[in-house]
Image: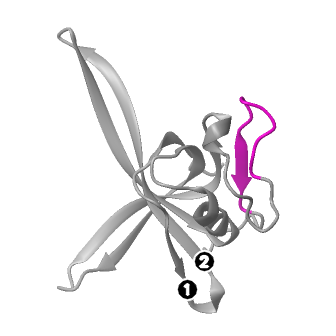
Amino acid sequence: MSGINKVILVGHLGKDPEVRHLDGGVTVASFPLATSETYNKDGKRIEQTEWHNIVLWRGLAEVASKYLQKGKLVYIEGKLRTRSFEDREKVKKYVTEVVAENFTILGRKSDFEQTPVSGENTTPKSENEYTNLTDPAGDLPF
């Protein structure tokens, strides 16, 4: 049996997605996502925030660039990936990212209201409806 690599996060975007177009026309988007937990310690309420590096590829990156903005609350499913690179001083660095496979924008109906993009209707039909966005190609670059 092989292992399982599954990440589920609900949090707020720390900034607008940064979108890049790589060789061959491949689109990649990335942004930080903040998740917060609260707990009581010695009668005081403590909030602990974790920051996650989110990466989206191809069609999912395109969708994210249209609909996600700083502060939006999103549900993200993906996989953990750790990669290495050399900085300008030739020092090897490591970074762990969540490679998103799909995301859902969470919030009230008013959070979704905006001008439709390319004839698409982005407004949910009801207050409780969520917008589930997945990579139409369903594939990752590796």
Residue 122 falls left or right of residue 39:
right
Q: Where the C terminus falls, by quadrant?
A: bottom right
Where in the figure is residue 128, as x and y percent of width and height?
Answer: 72, 29
Q: To which quarter of the image does residue 26 belong?
A: bottom right
Disc 2, SS: strand
Is residue 4 in view?
A: no
Compared to 129, does 61 lie above or below? below
Mark 1, residue position: 22
Residue 50 falls left or right of residue 11:
left
Disc 1, SS: loop
Residue 51 falls left or right of residue 75:
left
Q: Label 2: how many residues lie within 10 Å, few (<14), some (14-19) or many (20+)?
A: some
Identified at 58% across, 47% down, the residue is: 76
CB under 8 Å between discs 1 and 2: yes
Compared to 17, does 34 lie above or below? above
Mark 2, residue position: 27
Identified at 25% across, 77% down, the residue is: 92
Disc 1 residue type? Leu
Residues rendered magenta in the picture? 122-135
Identified at 22% across, 86% down, the residue is: 88
